[in-house]
Amino acid sequence: MPSAKTQPARGMRDFLPDDVRKREYVIGVIKEVYERYGFEPLETPAAENIETLMGKYGEEGNQLIFKILKRGVHEGSGEADLALRYDLTVPLARVVAEYRDKLPKFFKRYQIQPVWRADRPARGRFREFYQCDVDVLGSRSMVVEAEICAAAAEVLKRLGFNDFCIRLNHRKVLTGILGVAGVGLEQHDGALVALDKLDKIGRKGVEEELKSRGIPAVASQSLLDFFTELTALEHAAEIAAGEDVGQKQEALNKAVLGRIVEFVNDNEIGSQGVAELQSILEFTKAAGIAPQVRIDPSLARGLSYYTGAIMEISVKDLAGSLGGGGRYDNLVGMFAAQDIPACGFSLGLERILVVMSEREMFPSNLSGAAADVMIAIWNDESIGESIELAHQLRAQGLRVDLYPEADKLGKQFKYASARGVSFVAVIGDEERARGEVAIKDLRNGVQQTVKRAEVAFKLKLGKIFEFKQQ
């Protein structure tokens, strides 16, 4: 059993080489896709002024912010003036307000950095984790939502996911539904927090939470009846649509939107939300991702800064989501003297890694050797030449490990094999005298002697074809 002194803090993790390779593989795919959609990189500090973060994430979010106590002479005060960033969206809003004159009219950025939340650790849930964000600032067009959804969908497809769904809703639609149901405007935030848990704690659990938040029983029943009816409607539409995935999804969305229109009736805000959802569906169809997009009126997303469309990615048989986001047109205005429209999406790297590991979705060659070749040390007299050989091979693009000391060759071969290295190069006394190098292919045990000038070529060829007995 590992000692508590050597374990990382609860909810934090160490990443060994294989873990890092998997993370870098996924991040590499994400970066490549985001950049092909015209997004530029951005990084912000790990710590923000505490007033920058507080009040931006709703009541539950405020409780999960990691606060940093004042230092030096103020240490005993127990007060905090800084906090670790909770997400990448609020820091982005601060950056845009600070550098607005230096940024393009439509600022498209991606950001891949760790964030911290004082949450209870669980499967796929950590206190320190990476977020992979894309955001567009400066446009109110629904084209932005469609582009962001398309970018996220392409990332998942490139990683091998074929069973994901982009759930789509709108804060104005929710406002309309809540208003028609009889929930007071001052109770909307609390009701949304409860509704966001519908797929996690079920109708009874949400009913109890709505009651604890002071939502009238009549309003609560009206809301839950509406969502129960929608579930039955979706099931009926799915059966009627047949087997074609695209047609099935289109029928589902049409049926759900139709029922929402009936429910919100002449509610102005709700009707605006429906119109925007219809535009997004039209644009996602043009982007070729309509079969993956589903209207889900129960999707609420608890963060209080969302103002328009909200999105979340679900995968079959997975509790929780692989990412989410939405439009937040008023957030930047909290830091600047003007309103700047914005919309963004965040992929959950940690959950993606967990699911890909469980489903064995990583490329088979990802956990490859740390080096293409290891240079063994024949004896103390050959150390200098061995270092020179390593330097020469590295200059020719090979990954080269150098055994650090003279030792029995058997131990050196065993060490290279344990690290998955395919070749070991040795400059023995005879090879040194002839200007040659002995190379052993550990995959089949075949050894060849080649001229120093041909070593790199032979090794590069050997990566493709195993050595054959001469």
Image (cartoon, helix red, strand yellow):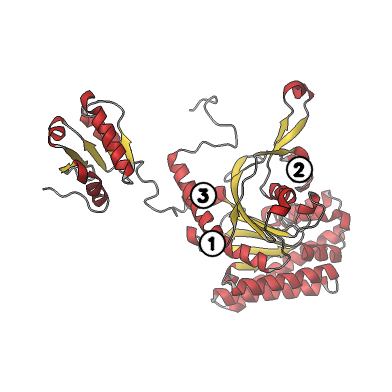
Q: Mark 3 vs mark 2: give the one in front.
A: 2
User: Mark 2 to mark 1: distance in Å?
Assistant: 32 Å
Residue 41 located left or right of residue 51: left
Q: Residue furthest left?
A: 470
Q: Residue at x 48, y 60 (%)?
A: 158
Q: Is residue 36 above or below residue 114?
A: below
Which residue has dot 3 on it? Answer: 353
Q: Amino acid at mark 1?
A: Arg
Which residue has dot 1 on it? Answer: 36
Q: Earlier in the sequence, mark 3 or mark 1?
A: 1
Residue 18 in the image, given as x and y percentages of width and height: 43, 42
Which residue has dot 2 on it? Answer: 52
Residue 391 in the image, given as x and y percentages of width and height: 31, 37
Q: Is residue 44 above or below residue 166?
A: above
Q: Mark 2 vs mark 1: give the one in front.
A: 1
Label 2 Cα crowd, 10 Å radius (few <14 / some 14-19 / many 20+): some
Residue 299 in the image, given as x and y percentages of width and height: 70, 60
User: Mark 3 to mark 1: distance in Å?
Assistant: 22 Å
In terms of image quadrants, where is residue 207? Answer: bottom right
Q: Amino acid at mark 2?
A: Thr
